[in-house]
Image (cartoon, rainbow, N blue to C red):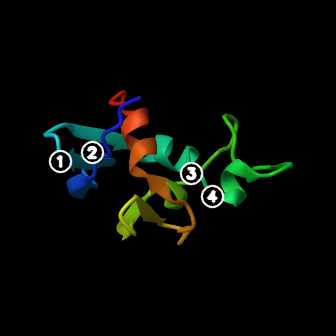
Amino acid sequence: MSDVFHRPRDWAIRPERRLFEVTWDDGNVTEYGWEDMRRACPCAFCSGEGSYKGMVNADTKFNETQITLKEVHPVGRYGLTPVWGDDHDTGIYTFKMLRRAAGLE
């Protein structure tokens, strides 16, 4: 794993392709499919916390609203929080998590 901490230079929601696109400070551009991104939500409700199992797994069926990305907000200097069509907005996707998912870490 790299010792360098990369941050996005820019990001965009691409509704026509149902993708979230990040342009990183090192020039890499990564794309994340909305459903995969929602399934990977790291919040306590979705992925669990402590000894509690999360409510989202490989068998979870999402409706169209749940996998529609409406907005994305920065969280401090370390992550992003997506707002989904059903107003779910408690997952913080760290920059390290996003880069790892794209095979950059």
Q: CA distance from mark 1 to mark 4?
A: 26 Å
Q: CA distance from mark 1 to mark 2?
A: 23 Å
Image height check: is 73 above or below 78?
below
Query: Who's the residue at 40% across and 58% down the image?
Result: 78
Quarter of image, res 101 = top left
- Spot occupied by residue 41 in the image (x, y as percentages of width and height): 56, 51
Query: Who's the residue at 28% across and 55% down the image?
Result: 15
Q: Which residue is mark 4?
A: 43
Marks 4 & 3, CB-CB < 8 Å contact: yes
- Judged left or right of residue 82, residue 12 is left
- Which of these two is toward me, 11 or 61? 11
Image quadrant containing the N terminus: top left
Q: Residue 25, which numbered label?
A: 1
Q: Of marks 3 and 2, which one's residue comes earlier in the chain? A: 2
Q: CA distance from mark 3 to mark 2?
A: 20 Å
Q: CA distance from mark 4 to mark 2?
A: 25 Å
Q: Of marks 1 and 4, which one's residue comes earlier in the chain? A: 1
- Judged left or right of residue 103, residue 93 is right
Q: Which residue is mark 2?
A: 17
Q: CA distance from mark 3 to mark 1?
A: 24 Å
